[in-house]
Image (tube, rainbow, N blue to C red):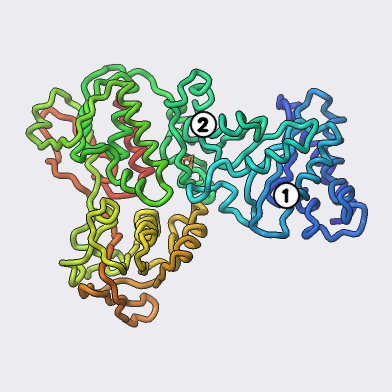
Amino acid sequence: MTEAEIETLIDAHVAAAIRCQKSGFQGVEVWAAYHSLLDQFWTPWSNSRDDKWGGTLENRTRMSRTIIEGIRRACGEDFIIGLAISTSDAQPVLLQGEALIETVARHDATGHVDYVTCGHGGYMDFERLMPTFLFGEKLTAPFTQTLKAALTNAKVTAEAHIRTPENAEAVIASGQADLVSIVRGQIADPHLARKTTEGRADDVRGCISCNQMCWGRRSRDYWISCLINPSVGREWEWGGDRFTPAANPRPILVIGAGPAGLEAARVAAERGHKVTLHEAAPRIGGQFRLAGLQPRRGQILDLLNWYERQFDRLGVALNLNSFLDADEIAAHPADDVVLATGSLPDPDARQRWLPGAGRLPGLDSGVWSPEDVLRHEARLGDSVILYDEGGNWRGMGTAWAIAEQGKSVTIVTPEPYLGREISRTSADGPLRGRLARLGVQNHTEHVITRWHGNGATIRSLLTGAEQTLAASALVMSTTNLAFDPFPASLPGKNLHRIGDCMAPRQAPYAFHEGRKLSLGL
Ligand code: SF4
């Protein structure tokens, strides 16, 4: 950058702050996080200038300090000025630790910074920036504790995986920060702050740190949504995460307590309907509960506990171990029946990349589904081949769960790399790292052509070459089949089919269909 370009950018920052103030904003946040421009000036590795903008700390912070002083002069003493920073130890050349604290303190000494907010990761280690459940919680709190002790004027905000009111309370009560920033937690439940203020933290629907519909959609340049709160992004259509009373409150029967049925039952009850929910299994959750048994995914089980609390609050009659047949549904007093019976693994384990091949030869013994594994019903032995054609958590998380048991795991997939579907959430790299450290092998762009009872023949999609891998068990993570044992219609009943029993897909679609249906009942 030329000096003239630097001066232009300084002026542009100040002009932007003035525009914000004129638009009614009470403050601005000066962006020096995630190795963006101002952070690049601060960092010796990326600032090799030998003029007044590089070299010493005084010079490297000149641009950001000049911006902050300019904003204060232009916008006055009451205007809030924040400074956004980040910390990461992913690359040793990044500014971190004492050097970062010294840099921030230089700005604090101007007396013009009202708060400093600290994120995690950066554009060079993006997966830490919006950490999924593969990472711990409250990631910046240890750093903000040290930073807070070093600053005399600015308040300090901790960010990064502070999901819940309990997380926030822990950080603030222990003095690790003055404030916390909760982003995804308030996407998952936009009423988080109000519920907490009212002493109802138990009512907060906790973000499950999946990134599937927030960052996962944003990364495709779509508007964001939320896996567990489908009203996000549809505020224009649904009026937000709130409900209007039903015009005609009446009995509603819901069959199946997977994500679609859970959400349909909850929302119908929120709107004043008298809801009865039947689930054939002894627990609610369906396949979602099994996903919650994969490593580090306990947040899903927390969410299922939240549904149970909501059902208690709303008076939903929950019947577990209860399979209704068509006659029992016909005899039920509810005219509106929601069928959310989900999907089951394909008993023939057909592969999408082998259309027309039919049932996998040799399927009769030693072949299991991910659900068998997660229910601890599979007898796997000590070496497992897992065939994954979804590129998502169903197969990948199951492979991880098996590898965590100390078994040898080989993943065979028609995809070009492991976890392709998860890559939209920036969890694929960290997952592949964990699998690699557990010794998991893989064969990408391959299909399975035969199971031998003690190994599988696999075929390359690139060359057609076949080879046989030894294994004590095969797990087939192929596309499920809809489970819908009921007639298309029943006299006098309005049957509403939602979720996987319509077409097996991923959880976000089930939550969305459950919410959408019950908003219209
Ligand atoms: S999509 Fe997942 S990570 Fe994003 S806010 Fe919703 S629950 Fe949280």
C-alpha span from label 2 to label 1: 27 Å
In the drawing, what numbered circle is on residue 166? 2
In the drawing, what numbered circle is on residue 470? none
The quarter of the picture where residue 299 lies is top left
Furthest toward the left, the residue is 327
The quarter of the picture where residue 521 lies is top left
In the displayed structure, would residue 63 be above or below residue 435? Answer: above
Q: Quadrant of the N terminus?
A: bottom right
Identify which residue, 345 or 239, lies in the foreground: 345
Q: Which residue lies at the image location 29% right of the left edge and 46% below the top edge? A: 287
Q: Which residue lies at the image location 56% right of the left edge and 46% below the top edge? A: 130
In the displayed structure, would residue 66 be above or below residue 385? Answer: above
Give the mark nearer the N terminus: 2 vs 1: 1
The x and y percentages for residue 129 are 60, 48
Residue type pointed to by label 1: Gly
- Please say whether residue 19 is visible from this viewpoint: no
The x and y percentages for residue 27 are 73, 29
- Please say whether residue 225 is visible from this viewpoint: yes
Residue type pointed to by label 2: Glu
Mark 2 CB lies closer than 8 A to ligand 1:
no
Residue receiving disc 1: 97
The quarter of the picture where residue 68 lies is top right
User: Left or right: where does residue 294 sit relative to residue 121?
Assistant: left
In the displayed structure, would residue 417 be above or below residue 27? Answer: below
Q: Which residue lies at the image location 18% right of the left edge and 45% below the top edge? A: 484
- Label 1: which secondary element: helix
